Image (cartoon, rainbow, N blue to C red):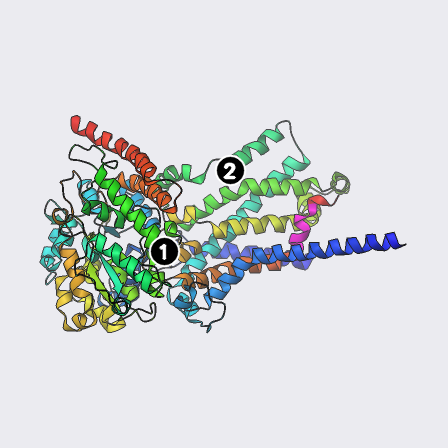
Amino acid sequence: MRARRIRIAAGLGAVALTTACAGAGSLTSGSSDATTIVVAIVSNPQMTDAISLSDQFTEEHPNINVDFVSLPENESRAKITASVATGGGEFDVVMVSNYETSMWAENGWLVNLQPYADATENYDTEDFLEPVRESLSYEGDMYSVPFYGESSFLVYRKDIFDEAGLTMPEQPTWQEVRDRAAAVEQARPDMDGICLRGLAGWGENLAPLNTVINTFGGRWFDQDWNAQLDSPEVREAVEFYVDLVQEHGQEGAATTGFAECATRYGQGRTAMWYDATSMVNVVESPDDSVTAGLNGYAQAPVVETEASGWLYTWSLAIPSTTEHADEAWEFISWMTDKEYAHTVAEAYGWERVPPGARQSTYEIPEYAEVAEAYAEPTLQAIRNANQDTTMTRPVPYEGIQFLAIPEFQDLGTRVGQQISAAIAGQISVEEALEQSQNYAETVGESYQQEEGE
Amino acid sequence: MAALDTAVQTRRRGGGALTVLTWFIGLLFFFPVFWMVLTAFKRETDAATDPPKLFFEPTLEQFGNLFDAGAGTYFLNSLFATTVSTLLVLLLAVPAAYALAIRPVKRTKDVLFFFISTKMLPVVAVIVPIYVIAGQIGALDNVWMLIVLYTAMNLPIAVWMMRSFLQEVPTEVLEAAQMDGATLRQNITQVMLPMVAPGLAATALICVIFAWNEFFFAVNLTASQAATVPLFLVGFMTSEGLYWAQLSAAATLASLPVVLAGWAAQKQLVRGLSMGAIK
């Protein structure tokens, strides 16, 4: 009994000792005379590569330590938004997208990066693809700089299409895509015609669906912020999308997002997939996909517009609360300059280079060779990704597959849930849009009041 | 005689069916854990197949990646926050439970209700004020902030659990010790605590599990310095790529300490958890 008590006491003592050592809340310590910057980042594959490569940065910059906080998209967005909006100040560099940048710049939450970029030799902001650059600018200045950019396009199995005697136009219409989905299913009954996202979320099913709504001539709001989700164009578009995925899409479509479609396509269980251009990282990787080298790419299908791809970019910004803006920029410029593509290629190969940000990346011969099948379709999709080419009528908001207003995270998720329920067959498209229209009207009214004041 | 035989047989058959059912339910509950451990030894492509693969070439690649990803800091933070907060909880809960169980006063019920009422508000409802306060006192990304919150989070449960264990202690024993000249402290530490050691172990383990697995406070209040194991886990989730095998490996590693703690305290636990049932 006594021996045990002594052991317990010893245990307590050991913990007390650790407590004393732990000091002011940190259990690890970096080198003392260096500045430590904290970088909040989304845990996608290319970002994980950057974290692994950051040793090279710290070797070149012995006066700077870099700590990473890497979280999945949703957690990361929530955390960064909370921190930046309340001035929490935990981060010196944050990863944001073209959804946040101009809103946050307007609120004064971000440091203007234009003077830094202009003062950095060879950084060359003109080299960023124009739609990407513009989507990250506020009043002509860049407030975040792109790490990679993406649009959307259609991937299809060239081998299966050849076998079935089918062809794919470079710029198909949605009707043509539907016909081909039906034809492929006839030729290959073991495969689905197409995979489309049905999982609820503004960044999930609403991303592809909104491009469909746009190209069918629909819009969320008219110029006076009147909600338009019950308009005939939107109804036609949503009915088309829901019918297509129900008739020729995957099983369990209502819970399928990017990752699930990637898996299905990668295992050769679907003949087409309309999604982000960044899909090439999965479908062209021999490790992840049986389809590597067998893929053809077509531009986002259209109906009434010239183009229909979306525009999304993960970019790096500096919150205005930081005390280390210079060091933060040093790091950002390392991760987004022209040299970074070479750094990645040396370590992991050219196929791992983050795409869709810089024109110069596409001019590197080695990259052009590796990316031969998808480089041009990606570039073309991004170049065309603006409201003029992807929409039929003007709208009062920025953005293609999202509305760059703060309310959209909530509104989009609610509408996404309605659409997902319609895809699952729990409610009709009619009912889904009626409810969505109600949600949208509430948001529209707040903008109408604002403009009325 | 024949009737008796039939009765015995029926009972046996009934017992057999019950055993089969128990095994079935047990396996049903264990299956996700088994699948997690199995997936940890797969390559990403094997993990993502549909239908799922039961046979594959095992690899340690995923575990290797974990150590490259710098798991150490996260585990150290979790270990520290869990141990210190659990000790603090026990330090505060035992005297409180003693007072509430052995020396109840007029408003004991109200006090108990007050304790448990702090668990009724969902954490998400108070996270903004907590975040702002933490920001203003400079306690964001500080492991001590987590310790304070974890202590507060587990204290009501610990008080309630310890109180029910202490109520089982016959007051006569404590009175006898008092008669022999034991002070209050001696009474608690030398007479009472050894009697409720299983209960204490059960309470401590519950606190350890809750603190070790806590995600919501950790994700909101920490960044790079004080991040705990659950954050390390979600860091592997990505919207653009396969991650199940990697995540499974991380989850297997993360659940090991708790499983080991539970295993070490197994005997005490079983006694502790069934304590109230045996009068």
Q: Secondary structure at mark 2?
A: loop
Span of residues in magenta: B267-275
Q: Chain of mark 2?
A: B
Residue drawn at x 30%, y 51% is A244
Residue drawn at x 22%, y 69% is A343
Q: Are marks 2 and 1 on the same chain?
A: no
Circle 2 residue: B119
x, y (%) of residue A408? 27, 40
Q: Secondary structure at mark 1?
A: loop
Residue drawn at x 53%, y 51% is B209
Q: Is residue B231 left or right of residue A385?
A: right
x, y (%) of residue B53? 47, 67
Circle 1 residue: A250
On whether residue B268 falls in the magenta region, the answer is yes
Q: Quadrant of the N terminus of chain A?
A: bottom right
Q: Is residue A393 left or right of residue A437?
A: left
Q: Is residue B3 left or right of residue B139?
A: right
x, y (%) of residue A148? 21, 58
Q: In terms of depth relative to the viewer, which is nearer, B180 or A93?
A: A93
On whether residue A452 falls in the magenta region, the answer is no
Q: Chain of mark 1?
A: A
Q: Quick check: can you spot residue A327?
A: no
Q: Mark 2 Cα within 10 Å, few/some/many (few <14, many 20+)?
A: some
Cα–Cα span, label 2 and label 1: 43 Å
Please say if A316 is above or below B131: below
Specify the farthest residue to the right: B1
x, y (%) of residue A270? 33, 61
Q: Quick check: can you spot residue B274?
A: yes
Q: In terms of depth relative to the viewer, which is nearer, B44 or A232?
A: A232
